[in-house]
Image: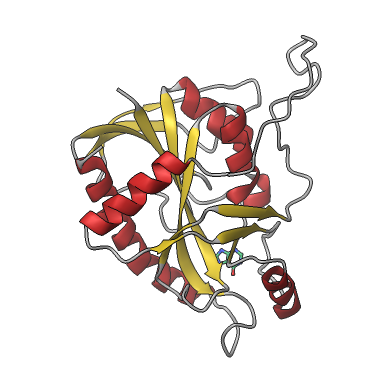
Amino acid sequence: MSILAIIGGTGLDALNVLHVDKREVINTPFGEPSGPVTRGDLFGQEVLFLPRHGYNHNLPPHQVNYRANLWALREAGADSILAVAAVGGIRADMGPGRLVIPDQIVDYTWGRPSTFFEHNFDGESKPVTHIDFTEPYCEELRQCLLKAAFAGNISIVDGGTYAATQGPRLETAAEIERLERDGCHLVGMTGMPEAALARELTLCYACCAVVANWAAGKSSGIITMADIEKNLKSGMKQVSDLLESLLSFR
Ligand code: HPA
């Protein structure tokens, strides 16, 4: 039986609908994950859960130990990962509260440990490996999510290019215009290196992006944390509905 792990993003530091069996502290060769991995029952299925920013939401996007998180989830038995992530909407149909299942990524992050394939990390010499990343998300899981949304009558956008920015600050209006010219449709701070690391570990990884705000310059006024939190609250209710639908026919 394959095990799905859910990585919770901002607004999903706890999965209230999860019946917790245990919390597993897992040490990895790459340091500590964001917290213990929670194992439990979600709508009748065994799942794993890890809040990306920690159970107290104290790790900013550039300080998340992405390698330790993915390593720990694989150690705990996950073979598929659903990454839930808050984003800013750039394209007109990606307004606050929408769910998007992206299908492409442009990576603007820097300085984050972004590969498991490093010389000598475990004292062994390994040949250089280049993963294929033409399609950065697992199409099988993407399709399951789209089917689940359809079956559960949950409105969702199929596809879109995710711009992964460094953060933790939000972007300038000019930066968002540039991302748009680059072909990006939504912007978040955690999509990379998470997706690439999952591919390196041959985990099936897809993202459910929850639009928290219009990206900078796409609406009048400034972006406030209060607005982000309000939109995420309604978005996360839809994520919970989506999970229920997904797990009922998985
Ligand atoms: N930009 C980057 N990351 C985000 C945003 C945004 O506007 N909103 C939520 N995460």
Looking at the image, residue 218 lies above or below residue 152: below
| Residue 53, horizontal then vertical, whole percent | 53, 48
Residue 157 appears in which quarter of the rendering? bottom left
Residue 10 vs residue 237: left or right?
right
| Residue 118, horizontal then vertical, whole percent | 77, 24
Name the residue at 41% across, 40% down: 140
Q: Quadrant of the N terminus?
A: top left
Looking at the image, residue 188 lies above or below residue 193: below
Number of marks in picture: 0
Q: Residue furthest bottom?
A: 220
Name the residue at 21% across, 40% down: 249
Residue 14 vs residue 61: left or right?
left
Q: 168 or 136, which lies in front?
A: 136
| Residue 200, horizontal then vertical, whole percent | 62, 29
Q: 56 or 123, which lies in front?
A: 123
Looking at the image, residue 15 lies above or below residue 209: above
| Residue 50 visible in the shown view | no
Looking at the image, residue 190 lies above or below residue 118: below
Residue 98 appears in which quarter of the rendering? bottom left
Q: 89 or 159, which lies in front?
A: 159
Name the residue at 23% across, 49% down: 245
| Residue 161, horizontal then vertical, whole percent | 59, 60
Name the residue at 27% across, 63% down: 154
Q: Quadrant of the C terminus?
A: top left
